[in-house]
Image: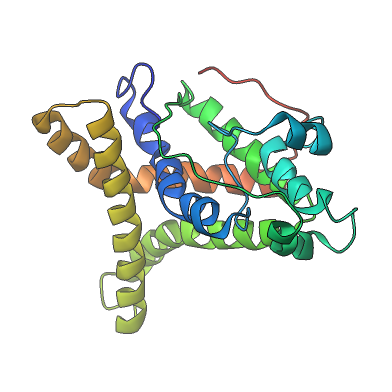
């Protein structure tokens, strides 16, 4: 949960990390609890490992995403470096190292400024691109395209008119994609507010803001992703939390 300190003091930043809550409670929980291997990478926040695993894999790396790097190394460490990274990731559960899910609540802190938010995301995306992991490339591609859809749609509508300019099947697909995305954010927000013991009136207000500000969140992430494709961070940038 990203509600540890000054929660909702900065609404856009409070909403921006909902995608991480959604990830933690969905695909990352699924892979840890049921697959026991990092099929989709992992979040380093609130990650716990044993000394045996850490001493075998080590945590020392110059990569910008040490948690994703670590997940790849855990997958391949017991294979003696054999096979490509994708094969190592898929076969890790047969080699001794497994991931698991601890049923508890851990609280984190979001960045304090929009600039720091974009810097943080840019580092993550660029770091994944430099790993040479096919799964990482796939995720960056799938993350880039949906984030560009809202801005591309708005631009097209501005120059062509509404709604006749878009084919009905395309409009239905876009509407479904946005509905799923907003529902995921809304559910993550409800769980996070509930954990923070937010009152019901404030919860309703937060849900309204989530709906209204959702396009802003996509623009922030799209900016970070595009800057990762264009500009390489010079190093591990320290941000304020």
Q: Is residue 138 left or right of residue 176?
A: right
Instruction: Find residue 200 and report its horizontal and vertical position in percent.
Output: 10, 32
Residue 49 coordinates in the image, percent (x, y): 65, 34
Query: Measured along the vertical axis of the image, is residue 4 above or below residue 126?
Result: above
Counting from the top left corner in percent of width and height, residue 235 is at: 77, 28
Q: Is residue 152 above or below residue 25?
A: below
In the image: residue 97, left or right of residue 2: right
Residue in view at x 74 percent, y 43 percent: 69
Q: In the picture shown, does residue 139 fall above or below 8?
A: below
Relative side of 136 to 197, left or right? right
Q: Nearer the viewer, residue 135 or 158?
A: 135
Residue 233 visible in rendering: no
Q: How is the image coloured?
A: rainbow
Q: Quadrant of the N terminus?
A: top left
Which picture quadrant has residue 173?
A: bottom left
Front residue (pair 149, 131): 131
Residue 19 left/right relative to 172: right
Task: Kindly tell me whether residue 11 is visible in this rendering.
Answer: yes
User: How many numbered circles are shown?
Assistant: 0
């Amino acid at each position: 949960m990203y509600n540890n300190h000054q929660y909702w003091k900065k609404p856009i930043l409070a909403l921006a990390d909902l995608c991480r809550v959604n990830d933690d409670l969905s695909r990352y929980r699924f892979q840890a609890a049921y697959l026991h291997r990092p099929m989709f990478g992992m979040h380093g926040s609130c990650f716990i490992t044993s000394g045996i695993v850490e001493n075998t894999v080590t945590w020392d790396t110059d990569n910008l995403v040490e948690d994703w790097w670590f997940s790849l190394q855990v997958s391949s460490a017991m294979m003696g470096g054999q096979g490509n990274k994708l094969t190592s990731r898929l076969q890790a559960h047969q080699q001794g190292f497994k991931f698991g899910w601890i049923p508890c609540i851990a609280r984190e802190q979001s960045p304090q400024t929009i600039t720091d938010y974009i810097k943080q995301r840019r580092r993550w995306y660029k770091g994944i691109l430099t790993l040479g992991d096919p799964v990482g490339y796939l995720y960056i591609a799938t993350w880039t395209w949906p984030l560009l859809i809202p801005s591309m749609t708005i631009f097209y509508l501005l120059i062509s008119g509404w709604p006749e300019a878009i084919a009905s099947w395309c409009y239905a697909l876009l509407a479904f994609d946005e509905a799923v995305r907003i529902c995921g954010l809304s559910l993550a927000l409800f769980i996070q507010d509930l954990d923070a013991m937010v009152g019901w009136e404030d919860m309703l207000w937060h849900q309204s803001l989530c709906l209204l500000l959702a396009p802003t969140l996509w623009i922030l992430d799209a900016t970070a992703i595009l800057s990762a494709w264009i500009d390489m961070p010079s190093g591990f940038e320290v941000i304020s939390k």
